[in-house]
Image (cartoon, rainbow, N blue to C red):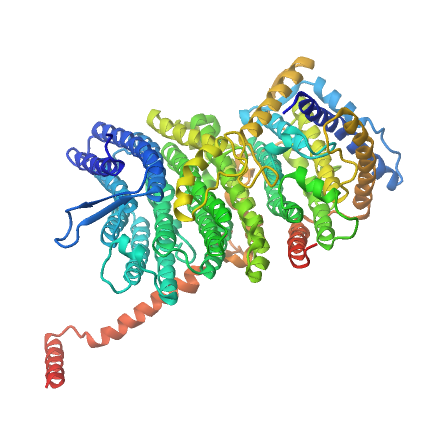
Amino acid sequence: MTITGLFSQLLQVVVALALAPLLIGWVNQCRAWLSNRRAPPITLPYRTIRKLFTKDAVVADNASPIFRITPYVVFGAMCCAAAIVPSLATTLPFASAADAIALVGLFALARVFIALAAMDIGTSFGSLGARREMFIGFLAEPALLMVLFTASLISGSTSLATIVDTLAHRELGIYPSLAFAGVAFTMVSLAENARIPIDNPATHLELTMIHEAMVLEYSARHLALLEWASWLKLFNYSCIGLALFVPFGIASGTGWTELLAAAPALIGKLAIGGALLALIETLSAKLRVFRAPEFLGTAFMLAVLAMLVNLLLGS
Amino acid sequence: MSPAPLALIGFAAAAWLAIGAAGLIRPRSLRAVRTLFSLGSVLGVAIAVVACVALAGSPESAVLPLGLPDLPFHLRVDALSAFFLLLLGSATAAISLFSAGYFRSGSGTAPGLICFQYHAFVAAMVLVLIADDAYVFMVAWETMALASYFLVTTDHRIPEIRRAGFLYLLIAHVGAIAILLCFGVLQGGHGDYTFAAMRSITLPGWWGSAAFFLALTGFGAKAGVLPLHVWLPEAHPAAPSPVSALMSGVMLKTAIYGLLRVTFDLLGAQLWWWGAIALALGLVSALFGVIFAAAQTDMKRLLAYSSIENIGILVAAMGLVILFKTNAKPLLAAIALAALLYHALNHAMFKSLLFLATGSVLHATKERSLGKLGGLIHRMPWVAWLALAGTLASAGLPPLNGFVSEWLLLQAFLFTPTLPQSFINMLVPLAAAALVLAVALAGYVMVKFYGVIFLGRPREPSLAYAQDAGGFERAGLVALAAACVLLGIFPATVLAAIDHVTSLLVGSQASGGDTSWLLLAPLGAERSSYSPLIVLGAIVGAVLITIQLVHRMWHGRVRRAPAWDCGFPLQTPRMQDTAEGFGQPIRQVFEPFFRIERHLPSPFDAKPRYSVVASDHWWHWLYLPIARAAEAVARLFGLIQRGRISVYLTYSFVTLLALLLFVL
């Protein structure tokens, strides 16, 4: 581990932290345009965070320490995930500490903590949200793992860096297994990031909310960290998707010039990806909670199919 | 020269028996029992230390002039026994420490008698692990079953507990018969029942398969593999919590030990399709167990079903080992076997921890039903925080121990597609999918377990008087929680110990590749790597830096206020999710798995009641038909049993006549 490697690693995390609110601002802007509304400024998420940090945190009387530590744990786990996901470069020092399976484990850790915190106050909405979140998670997590396994089978490795290197240096063409995996991954990302059609990030309607129900009791800096972590999660998922299915322009070294060259490519891909996400969200309607298993079951089956196709056709 | 490990282990087992016998002197004296359990705990540590030495040493055997005249006891300790002795010693040490504070005089068995049964149980398990002939093995196995039966029925005045004990004994004996028959097949007609003789014979194909399936049935009955799992969810809630911990954490592992001993050591794992069947059976058990765990409302039943899940994972891993070994892929076989042994060790730690935590909760609240608990983290912080370690480990989350073994197993799964059987290659993605589904569901189950017991608001007013666990109980819990963390962050050290077993059974080592103390990379860092210590450091570092930055740049002010809950004015603890409510989505998605009896209130009910009972299909598919058949046969015999002496005399006379005719 060299000093430059360490700095590049830190740079990647800082870039992720800085770009995550911008990505969500961009998605919200696109959504507003697509539904013929006047768009909020793209920097709104930054202002929201700053506003929340200056406020006094209000914590329920019967909250346990789990409630107060959770925002930090979730945020920390997402920062680690941002260090693992190859967004700018593949050969970063932290990449060898955790592979694709450990990455899914980190997401699961964040999910379990946020669900526990939601149950901690003992309100009806909190436990409802926790139950729904774990319900979505138990189907989405295997589907995500199967998508990553398909990519691992192609590259013979579960290390994300090796996967991306292999995928980026293949012949350009349509690979049926990756096509299936791509559809499955898109569906899982929508569900995991609380987007339409599984959850609606813009609602506080009791009967439909999942993520919002869990963070209802949070305020001020705790809420800011949780919101930032959820944006970071969207950023991480987008970067995983880009790295697996559009793995071009990612630096394979750790030099400053390479990283600087990789940044515009990343921002360009994220801009297109964010616009597509807004398009999907605008075109679809939210599903009832009990239709979610069908949606995620389809994603899971597609991911398994991708693995089977890969084994049968070898591509 | 230092004393031989085998002798030390034998002495420790005898000392455990002596401690147990000493408990009988003053059975109602709590102070005596407390001292004896503490001594037993020290012996557990000693066994673990000796096992560590034996693990690295060469196999060692002894013949004791005990038993019947022509049948001396053959004992042997090799790496496989030593590994399981290590598991037994370390888990028992913590559980005994907890037990020292747990057992109090109640309406059931006297504490001194429990002390005797407990130590006889542990000593019998040691003997199972060091037995080197079928005779000693069966004696120890049956002693273990009987001692645990008596422990399960500690509260024997309650009819359900007697019923649970009977069911346990029944299935234990069905299993024992299968094991006995298995040894009968294994000796191959030579009449020599030592393991050494069995090892030297190669059985012809079908006899080998018969032995394997008898072993799978027999040990599967003890381990709780589908469909012989029904005793687990009955016996675990019935038994006192330390006994549940010992049974789930250690006794189930002796069954896994037996399965490994017979399959790899005595039979030499001959045919690949044994592996395919074990894999399928294990995955079905795992999925079934975890789905049922999600629907449970009794905290100990929930953990019992979760044990079925974990045993299923172990059996599936064994199937994978057989597949790799028969296809001459020693490195992959070693990784799968290492995953199996690692998971067995992890499960012993986290499941014992969780069972003991339920014991403390039970003592403090007298409640086992999840629907009547809640908010205990405020009243019982020690138990709650230590149980959190077990919960996260059991949910398979990094950087705790449950994740490491699952990671290793998934690695083994991922590189399966190099097998020559294309049929198996096709099924492996499905198997991997089933495994990850089971692991993800385990997260659901554990959030339910922890959230409903320890978080939220107390569902009953009496919970406000719950007391935290005492000193001994805390010490036991701390030891197990520390084991969960340490096993999680130093996997390379554990793998180095497991290597002795893998080189014995499959002839390769799992800690090859780029594995160092910091990094786990059995197949080389290019293919996969995981470093729990770095992950832990990164998360803790990120958390600390964030806290510091936020507090420095802005402020750390906190105001306490009533919960908001979207502004709803009236909130009662009854409005939280119950255990039924939390498990309801799973019950709905997996409805065909359950046999559901719903009672819906009609509009005219004066006292409307709604109830749902989700029970196990296997009762109705397998056990009740067998019970009915047994009753029908008994009724047939009843026809000839008239209860009059003249009729019986006539039978004897007719039999004599028939025999005379036959002889003449």
Toward the viewer: B446 or A76? Answer: A76
Question: Residue placed at 47% from the left, 52% from the top?
Answer: B316
Toward the viewer: B185 or A288? Answer: B185
Q: The N terminus of chain B lies in which quarter of the figure? A: top left
Question: Residue placed at 65% from the left, 15% from the top?
Answer: B551
Q: Whole-percent x and y of residue B27?
A: 18, 35
B82 sits to left or right of B440: left
Can residue A210 be seen in this snapshot?
no
Can residue A185 be seen in this snapshot?
yes
Q: The C terminus of chain B lies in which quarter of the figure? A: bottom left
Toward the viewer: B612 or A112? Answer: A112
Q: Whole-percent x and y of residue B433?
A: 58, 51
Question: Residue placed at 35% from the left, 52% from the top?
Answer: B265
Q: Is residue B408 above or below residue A306?
A: above
Q: Is residue A3 above or below residue A109?
A: above
Q: Is residue B77 above or below residue B30?
A: below
B600 sits to left or right of B230: right
Instruction: Examine the image and state in which quarter residue A206 appears.
Output: top right
Q: Is residue B273 above or below residue B551?
A: below
Q: Whole-percent x and y of residue B207?
A: 35, 65
